[in-house]
């Protein structure tokens, strides 16, 4: 299994690129997050790689950052997600933003990624939330304190952790009519009281 590939970029047309390594051209698939930062044709590049072999095909994927490769591998452990959707995720959202979105259980944001439906997004949240902190960019482990700090967002996250669905938690916070000076605890209390009526 190849872990890194170092050579000159001789062709790039998303999602494909070809890297010349000592006269051998390696064709790789890569997410847009990698394409944005690729050097010009003829320049040297070093890529983290993922080799995938199926019964009828062999594929090689390239990433500029190890955190992207790690996320690519992790999301494919979720039922219903293959390489194509994993590449779409990396093309549509940064690793750090993905981690924050999963930790915040923001299914709506995940559904904005092409190829991700509501059920797949919910499965990702359930299956990846506990491991999401280990997928932070370049080894950074994100904790819940790295999620949005405004009181309304904190209240929505807390209600989700109590078992409310993301849309329901957001509606409860809106219906609680939080004041500008309300902290997260006050908003949660108002939301729960409002839900009991």
Image (cartoon, rainbow, N blue to C red):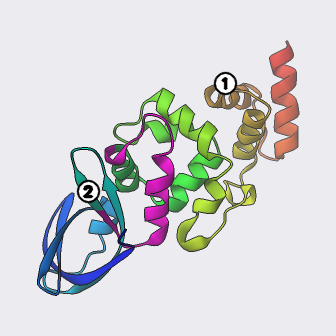
Specify start and end residues of the magenta stretch as a single range: 61-84
Q: Position of residue 20 (x, y in %)?
A: 16, 80
Q: Is residue 42 above or below residue 159?
A: below
Dot 1: within a 10 Å radius of its alpha carbon, few (fewer than 14), some, or many (20 or more) residues? some
Q: Quadrant of the N terminus?
A: bottom left
Q: Is residue 83 magenta?
A: yes
Q: Position of residue 141 (x, y in %)?
A: 66, 66
Q: Position of residue 33 (x, y in %)?
A: 35, 63
Label 1 or label 2, whichever lies nearer to me, is: 2
66 sits left or right of 21 in the view:
right
Of 163 and 173, nearer the camera is 163
Of 74 and 159, nearer the camera is 74
Q: Which residue is mark 1?
A: 168
Q: Which residue is mark 2?
A: 59
Q: Is residue 174 magenta?
A: no
Residue ID at (62%, 54%)? 132
């Amino acid at each position: 299994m190849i872990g890194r590939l170092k050579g000159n970029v001789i062709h790039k047309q998303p999602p494909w690129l070809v890297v010349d390594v000592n006269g051998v051209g390696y064709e790789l698939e890569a997410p847009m997050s990698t394409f944005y930062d690729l050097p010009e044709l003829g320049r040297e590049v070093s890529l983290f790689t993922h080799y995938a072999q199926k019964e009828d095909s062999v594929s090689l994927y390239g990433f500029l950052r190890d955190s992207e490769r790690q996320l690519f591998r992790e999301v494919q452990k979720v039922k219903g997600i293959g390489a194509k959707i994993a590449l779409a995720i990396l093309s549509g959202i940064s690793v750090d933003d993905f981690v924050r979105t999963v930790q915040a259980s923001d299914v709506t944001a995940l559904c904005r990624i092409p190829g991700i439906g509501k059920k797949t997004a919910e499965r990702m949240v359930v299956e990846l939330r506990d491991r999401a902190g280990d997928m932070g960019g370049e080894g950074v482990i994100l904790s819940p304190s790295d999620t949005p700090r405004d009181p309304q967002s904190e209240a929505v996250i807390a209600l989700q952790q109590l078992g409310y669905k993301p849309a329901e938690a957001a509606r409860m916070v809106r219906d609680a009519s939080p004041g500008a000076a309300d902290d997260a605890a006050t908003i949660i209390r108002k939301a729960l009281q409002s839900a009991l009526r």
